[in-house]
Image: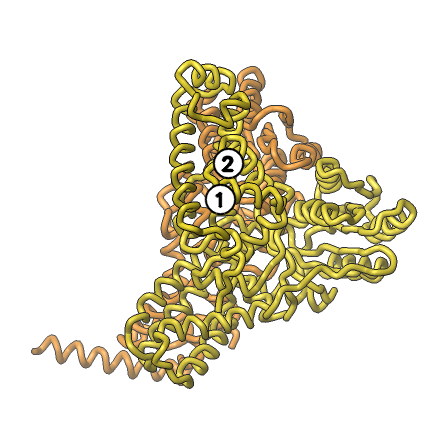
Chain colours: A orange, B yellow
Amino acid sequence: MFNKIKEALKKTSEKFINTLTEVVTGKAVLDEDKIEMLETIMLQSDFGAEITDSMIDTIRKDMKSEKIRDVETLVLTAKGVLKDSLITDRNKAFEGENLPHVILIVGVNGVGKTTTLGKLANKMISEGKKVLIVAGDTFRAAANEQLEIWAKRSGAVIFSNYSKDPASVIFDALEKTKTEKFDYVLIDTAGRLHNKKNLMEELAKVKNVIKKQIPSAPHDILLIIDANNGQNALRQAEEFNSLLDLTGFIVTKLDGTARGGIIFNICSRYKIPIKYIGVGEGTDDLLKFNQEEFIDSFFEEILKK
Amino acid sequence: MFEDLQEKLEKTLKKITGQGRLSEANISDTLREIRRVLLDADVNYKVAKQFIDDVKVKAVGQEVLTSITPGQLITKIIYDELTRLMGGSGAELQLNPSGPTIILLVGLQGSGKTTFSAKLAKYLMARSRKVLLTAADVYRPAAREQLKILGGQIGAPVFTIDDSKDAVKIATQSVDYAKNNGLNTVIIDTAGRLHVDDELMDEVVQIKNAVNPTEILFVVDSMTGQDAVNSARAFHDKVDFNGVVLTKLDGDARGGCALSIKAVVEKPIKFVSLGEKLDSLEVFYPERMASRILGKGDIISLVEKAQAQVDEKEAEELEKKILANKFDFEDFLKQIRMIKKMGSLKSLMSMIPGIGSAVKNMDIDDKQLVKVESIIQSMTRQERKNPKILNGSRRMRIAKGSGNSIQEVNRLIKQFGEMQKMMKMLGSKGNKNFLGNIKNIRFN
């Protein structure tokens, strides 16, 4: 009984203090518009209905229990939920403990695998590393020519053989690492839709071939996700991860108006980290993923008004 | 294509079927589910909202006739609304009656412009157009190389200026080149560009002004999410494109962006592209796609596709043989070759109503057809005509000759026997014109 009264008093005083704060600081009052705004932002940023609906439910519950009373707390809560969804158990940057560090780049068609690989090579070389690029896309016309130009730009060594299948090209390329020292090996692969069983099996074979040459490799398998993609990216992550055990994502084309919100659903499901984001076609347009900045970017609009 | 959307809508519709009559309450449940379905399918949230509102108004206002179930009624309303949103009726590619037809392709990076340009060239060449491909993507490394290789694969000339950074100049000169070389169609592949990149958007406007295209097509990845409306609107405002091309529909994307784009810019989807093979291109039919979303299948597409490829006489002869129960390995081989001409077996089967969702997770290997073909080719003419004489030593010879195992040969012969039995039944039931019947099926 005594506790209950104490609790009630505490709540009342909290409420009083909050009201007072609101009057004094002029913090925005929370209304239905702000919640709708949050919902709109999330839906149009491709978070998806599932995550959006559950976020709005959480917010409403917290409002009922008066945990949320102003816009700032609302945004803070939303940010907290998003931050939690990005928690992973393997948030390691590329580390050169196993040399060479072998990175396999995979993804559906047109997401920017080759461009990302080129930028990655450039980044590593500018850090003084020795990089081998392997042209594992033997399917798309002129894919190896495209990589060759990127190799030339960055000064990486390139291994390609258009007349062979990807597994044997990669096998031969890794043979090279036995006589020559490399810090990183970046392997490009052909774009493939995740529902193409034969093409996906080819990737599994590629992984096995890499293991044959270097048992600890590949040290990273990165799925490239186009920020323009909507809910289908979830299916991509599901299929590529179940086949290959991904170690990270790179979200590309974030320099446009697409926000890539689906990545939150993906990360919370698979606990796999986002390593980089792509923000353009220039050699330096690959940024280390900054969680705070990325999350903040979604809420600028709601805080403004 | 659209399989998931179709499956989900089927599910929600099943729930409402058998509930007697539409009531405000049972509609609102279904509509909420449809909203979720549409959002999961990447339909823009505003378009989805509008869609739900429209359907609601139409559904609640209508009387339920005793002759139809509430499920049928709401199916029809949703179907009509989807069809309306996606454009009403199909739109053909415009051709220039005097002078060359110039087709300009625009879109974001990675939407599949270069692959599509080669597919479109092949499509038009099959319709007796003399096509020139123009490589005007001067930014992406080796983009010009890619188009040259694709052009080589389909036997189309490719125009570009290798070291030039001037896309406008390349486009302009390619049109002159076409005129001077008796080519009546020019397909201009441009660089992928973000709609917020003013400089590159200006470039594409300059190309447009310089060559005055007959058609401008906006190429969009069917996996695109909510932002599709923004890029479509921006490209539309800048270059006023005539039509949309939806690519990568052989994936499992629900393709809701097709609905969104249509709703926002009011331009028809002219082609859908489904695969990396250069002949996997289809004309878009909105009504059929709406039917397909609602689980009715796209049997009209299937029939038309078959008609375009299959020689009518061959089909007639086949029908006669089936009726006379004289279908042999020789005919089987012909059929296999027809199927191969029509594209992948899976894409063909997925268009049949009721099969679509079953085929989705099946692994249909087109290589199997090649295998079957090789086995039949290793048979003598006599054996093909009269499979009964295929004894052990003949089978062994066929296995060796075709590079397959004896088990595989046995399996094929057994399956063929079963097929013959089925056809016998078909013939005896008096289904004389069963191919004709399929052609006459119409929905609604």
- Residue at mark 1: B346
- Cα separation between marks 1 and 2: 8 Å
Sequence-first tag of 1 and 2? 1
- Residue at mark 2: B366
Q: Nearer the viewer, residue A47 or B307?
A: B307
In the structure shown, which secondary structural element does the residue marked by tag 2 occupy?
Answer: loop
Q: Are marks 1 and 2 in contact (CB under 8 Å)?
A: yes
Q: Position of residue B61 (x, y in %)?
A: 42, 86
Q: Tell me: residue A238, above or below residue A79.
A: above
**Disc 1: CA contacts within 10 A as few (<14), some (14-19) or many (>=20):** some
Look at label 2 and name its amino acid. Answer: Asp
Q: Position of residue B218 (x, y in %)?
A: 67, 59
Residue A50 position by quadrant: bottom left
Q: Tell me: residue A4, above or below residue A80.
A: below
Asked whether, in this view, residue B295 is left or right of residue B197, the answer is left
Asked whether, in this view, residue A119 is left or right of residue B210, the answer is left
